[in-house]
């Protein structure tokens, strides 16, 4: 096990908690990117889910909301673990950006479908579903921007740092 990766996942999980507790643009959060990146780094499944537990820890502080929407949020967020594992095979820039886009779209569809299905805010017809999705578009833009930005940043910095470390090891030999 790479202890550096474990410490990094723990540190990023703390960042995920703190990022939810400070003011931020709605849905502009590093959480999904941290989950993707942590699953990419994780030496085992327990470490991959640590940032998901950060979501729970911050919800304990912020308060819970309707159980069905909360379940949808956790499901959509947990999908990022699978996305991160998929990136282990080929973490090229295009794949990292695609992961951020996929994460944003899946979160948007799953959570807003849950809101439409379980709330009494909308009629249960196609037009109301489209209206629900339309109202959520500003949040989707923030989610998409943050997922692309934070995923690109995490993977780029990691790649740069690991290449510098390898460079130093090679030059010492």
Image (tube, helix red, strand yellow):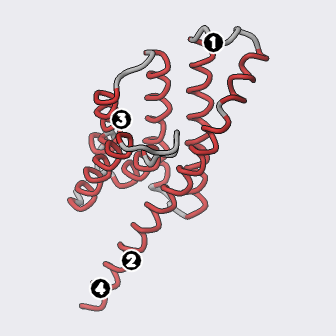
**SS for tag 3?**
helix
In the image, which is nearer the foreground, mark 3 or mark 2? 3
Q: Residue 55 got which mark?
A: 3
- Cα–Cα gap, marks 3 and 2: 31 Å
**Which residue corresponds to mark 1?**
121
Q: Earlier in the sequence, mark 2 or mark 1?
A: 1
In front: label 3 or label 1: 1
Disc 1 crowd, CA 10 A, few/some/many (<14, 14-19, 20+): few
- Camera-side residue: 79 or 111? 111
The CA span between labels 3 and 1 is 26 Å
The answer to whether residue 55 is left or right of residue 142 is left
Residue 117: give x, y in percent of width and height: 61, 13
Return the disc, 3 or 1, that comes first in the chain's sequence.
3
Q: Residues within 10 Å of mark 3 (few under 14, many from 20)?
A: some
Mark pair 2, 4: CA separation: 9 Å
Measured in 3D between alpha carbons, the distance from the residue under mark 1 to the one under mark 4, in whole angstroms, is 59 Å
Q: Is residue 163 above or below residue 38?
A: below
Q: Residue at x 52, y 39 (%)?
A: 26
Of circles 2 and 1, the one toward us is 1
In the rendering, which numbered label is found on residue 163?
2
| Label 2: which secondary element | helix
- Viewer-proximal residue, 75 or 166? 75
Q: Secondary structure at mark 4?
A: helix
Residue 13 coordinates in the image, percent (x, y)? 30, 46
Dot 1 or dot 4: first in sequence order is 1
Q: Which residue does the image show at 56% across and 26% down from the upper left? A: 111
For the image, the number of numbered tags is 4
Answer yes or no: is residue 7 visible: yes
Q: Indicate left or right for 143 with 156 as reference.
A: right
**The disc label shown at residue 168, or none:** 4
């Amino acid at each position: 096990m790479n202890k550096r990766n474990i410490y990094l996942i723990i540190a990023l999980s703390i960042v995920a908690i703190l990022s939810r507790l400070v003011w931020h643009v709605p849905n502009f959060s590093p959480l999904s990117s941290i989950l993707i990146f942590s699953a990419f780094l994780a030496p085992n499944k327990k470490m991959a889910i640590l940032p998901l537990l950060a979501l729970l820890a911050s919800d304990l502080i912020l308060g819970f909301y309707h159980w069905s929407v909360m379940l949808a949020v956790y499901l959509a967020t947990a999908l990022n673990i699978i996305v991160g594992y998929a990136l282990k095979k080929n973490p090229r820039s295009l794949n990292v950006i695609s992961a951020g886009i996929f994460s944003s779209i899946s979160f948007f569809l799953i959570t807003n479908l849950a809101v439409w299905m379980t709330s009494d805010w909308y009629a249960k017809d196609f037009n109301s579903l489209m209206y629900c999705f339309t109202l959520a578009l500003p949040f989707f833009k923030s989610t998409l921007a943050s997922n692309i930005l934070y995923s690109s940043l995490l993977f780029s910095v990691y790649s740069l740092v690991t290449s510098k470390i390898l460079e130093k090891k090679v030059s010492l030999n």
